[in-house]
Image (cartoon, helix red, strand yellow):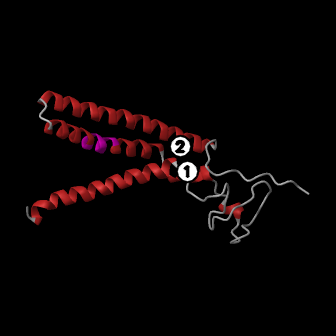
Amino acid sequence: MGLIAMLPLVLFLVLGGLVLGSAVLGIRRSAFLPKGLPAACCPACRYSVDTTRPIERCAECGRDLRVAGVLSPELIVRYQGTTSQITGGVGLLCVILMLVAGLGTSAGIGALGSSDEVVVISGLVTAGLVLVGGILAGFWLANRRKRLLQGSDTTHPQPPEQAET
């Protein structure tokens, strides 16, 4: 098999990897908080800001927070991605996994010498199971995004209230 004959396969794998990577990145950006982010921070330098009292400037970089605003995890999730990115990413992953699982199961059972009907049915059942799993994962991720936007599911603990002395 020459190099020219392998070119379509290589292009398919490269483009498939790029599409798969963008789907995973879209899901990650839409449904998960960035790591290491404090409860509220300066948008310029990510310095933790105490929001329990009025503050005008960032103590680290001096940025005017009345103009720039304070960055919160919920705000980041809101502007990083959308629920349609989750839906599209999970759908794309399901299609790819359905093809791989269905063809793999069919090829494996076909190699055992089973009849054609058993091979087709096993491929369809496997693809259907992947589809159901993808639908459940999509609902879970969309619900997670909804909870993040409401502020009820944060992986970052809120700062303890400071007692005034």
Residue on which the image places disc 1: 77
Q: CA distance from mark 1 to mark 2?
A: 8 Å
| Residue lying furthest front | 112
Residue numbers of the magenta segment: 94-100
Residue type at mark 2?
Answer: Arg
Residue on which the image places disc 2: 145
Q: Nearer the viewer, residue 88 or 104?
A: 104
Residue 97 placement: quadrant:
top left
* Residue 116 horizontal side relative to residue 75, left or right: left
Q: Earlier in the sequence, mark 1 or mark 2?
A: 1
Q: Nearer the viewer, residue 104 or 25?
A: 104
Q: Residue at x 17, y 28 (%)?
A: 118
* Residue 7 horizontal side relative to residue 148, left or right: left
Where residue 27 appears, as percent x and y from the top left, is: 44, 48
Q: Residue at x 33, y 44 (%)?
A: 92
Residue 73 covered by magenta stretch: no
Residue 111 placement: quadrant:
top left
